[in-house]
Image: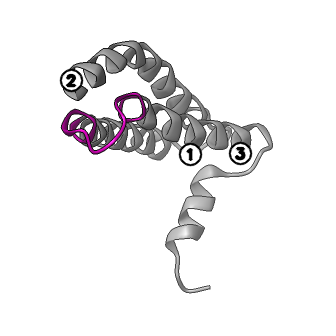
């Protein structure tokens, strides 16, 4: 029964996944400098692939009964919608998204 419930909830969550993907891509595809926007688009693709990977993991956990079926279907959307809203907030306030990621990855502070 958990496998069927997980797939049923996933069918309802799948259209929202498309909207979350757009929410991830929009702030990363808008750039105001003269440099190319390739790095932002690359990051949007990486985040989308990570969302699909995490979605397949949570679906497997939901189908096995380890996680509640509704949570398994909706958790990737919730997590990545939060990330997308954070990125959108950073873009609207004028803070550089890519510079903040570089600062997170730079451990030499």
Quadrant in the picture for residue 8: top left
The first of marks 2 and 1 along the sequence is 2
Q: Badge 3 local density, few (<14 within 10 Å), some, or many (20+)? A: some
* Residue 72 sits inside the magenta stretch: yes
In-front residue for pair 86/39: 86
Report how far apart the C-alphas of labels 3 and 1 lie in the structure: 19 Å
Q: Which is in the foreground here, disc 2 or disc 1?
A: 2
Q: Residue at x 55, y 38 (%)?
A: 28
Quarter in which the C terminus is drawn: bottom right
Looking at the picture, the colour scheme in use is: one colour
Residue 29 higher or lower than 96, as above or below: above
State the extent of the magenta-drawn residues as a range.
Answer: 60-73
Which residue is labeled 2 in the image? 1
* Residue 61 sits inside the magenta stretch: yes
Numbered tag placed on residue 35 in the rendering:
1
Q: Which residue is drawn at 42% across and 37% down?
A: 76
Which residue is labeled 3 in the image? 90
Q: Which residue is drawn at 37% across and 36% down?
A: 68
Give the SS element for disc 3.
helix
The first of marks 3 and 1 along the sequence is 1
Residue lying at the far right in this picture: please name it.
93
Report how far apart the C-alphas of labels 2 and 1 lie in the structure: 52 Å
């Amino acid at each position: 029964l958990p496998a069927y419930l997980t797939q049923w909830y996933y069918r309802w969550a799948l259209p929202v996944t498309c909207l979350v993907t757009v929410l991830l891509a929009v702030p990363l595809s808008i750039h105001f400098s003269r440099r190319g926007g390739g790095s932002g688009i690359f990051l949007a693709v990486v985040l989308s692939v990570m969302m699909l990977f995490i979605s397949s993991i949570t679906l497997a956990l939901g189908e096995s009964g380890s996680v509640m079926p509704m949570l398994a279907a909706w958790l990737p959307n919730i997590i990545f919608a939060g990330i997308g809203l954070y990125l959108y907030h950073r873009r609207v306030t004028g803070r550089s998204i890519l510079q903040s990621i570089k600062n997170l990855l730079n451990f030499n502070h």
